[in-house]
Every structure is written in C-alpha cells, then in structure tokens.
Image: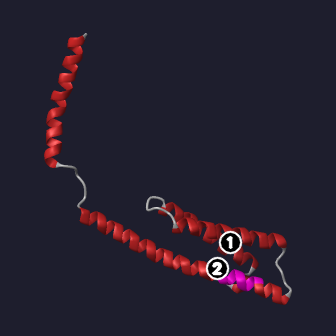
C-alpha cells in the first residue's frame, strides 16, 4: 500500500511540475495597473456625478415636503391621514435608500442605486397622487 501512495504522490508532482513552471514563467494574467485605475476612476467619477444629481433631487424633495406641510398648516388644509401616511412612508423609504446609496461599497453600489431609483419613483408617484398641481 505504501508504494502506491508514494507513486501517486510522485505522479502528482511530475504532472504538476510543467504546468507550474509554465505558469510561473508567464505570470498571472491580470490587467495592468493603469487599466484598473482607469476603471476605478471612471466608476468613481460616474458615481460622484450620479450622487450629486441625486443629492439635488433629495434636496428638492425635502423642500417640497416642508413647503407642503407649511402650506397645509397655513391654509388649514391637511391631507387625509392615510394619504399623508403613504407620502411619509415613501419619503422615509427614499431617505433610507439614499443613505444606503451614499455608503454602498463598489460591489453593492449598483444594487443600492437601483433600490434608490425605485424608492424615488415611488415617492414621485405618491406625490403626484396627492399633489397633482404642485409638480
């Protein structure tokens, strides 16, 4: 039994030897650092541009929500509680997804962006239902 183990071990070294040597000569097949940096810079730039646009959108929603609350208070007109609750939920979800987007890693950023956009569309839909003239 022992000679079989030794011959199998020897066979594995012999078989792997040429492959290992060839792989070591060529080195790993990786993109140059310049290409990786260019991709990272491109992603970083696109991410920053997107987040700047999204920040403006979040600021706009914040202003709309405050203005609607102030207007309702000044005019004595309030939305029905269920309507206000729907808008408040949509706004809370949008803010939550925005926070996740801001802190997302490069790997999770695309999922976070999609979730933020979904929440933002929901917010727009809820707003349009109850404030059709304020678009």
Tell me where residue 85 appears, x and y as whole percent: 78, 69
Q: Residue at x 66, y 72 (%)?
A: 123
Quadrant the N terminus occupies: top left
> Which residue is identified by label 1?
91
Q: Residue furthest top?
A: 1
Q: CA distance from mark 2 to mark 1?
A: 8 Å
Q: Which residue is mark 2?
A: 61
Q: Secondary structure at mark 2?
A: helix
Q: Residue at x 44, y 71 (%)?
A: 47
Question: Which is the main secondary structure of the residues drawn in magenta?
Answer: helix
Question: As displayed, is residue 126 above or below residue 35?
Answer: below
* Image quadrant assignment for residue 63: bottom right
Whether 50 is among the magenta residues is: no
Depth check, front residue: 127 or 106: 106
Q: Secondary structure at mark 1?
A: helix
Q: Residue at x 30, y 66 (%)?
A: 37
Q: Is residue 107 above or below residue 48?
A: above
């Amino acid at each position: 039994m022992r000679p079989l183990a030794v011959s199998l071990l020897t066979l594995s070294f012999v078989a792997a030897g040429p492959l290992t040597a060839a792989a070591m000569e060529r080195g790993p097949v990786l993109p140059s650092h310049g290409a990786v940096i260019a991709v990272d810079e491109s992603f970083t730039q696109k991410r920053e541009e997107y987040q700047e646009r999204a920040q403006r959108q979040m600021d706009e929603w914040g202003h709309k929500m405050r203005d609607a609350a102030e207007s309702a208070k000044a005019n004595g007109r309030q939305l029905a509680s269920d309507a206000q609750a729907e808008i408040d939920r949509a706004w809370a979800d949008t803010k939550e997804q925005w926070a996740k987007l801001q802190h997302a890693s490069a790997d999770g950023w695309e999922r976070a962006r999609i979730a933020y956009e979904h929440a933002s569309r929901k917010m727009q839909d809820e707003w349009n239902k109850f404030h059709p003239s304020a678009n």
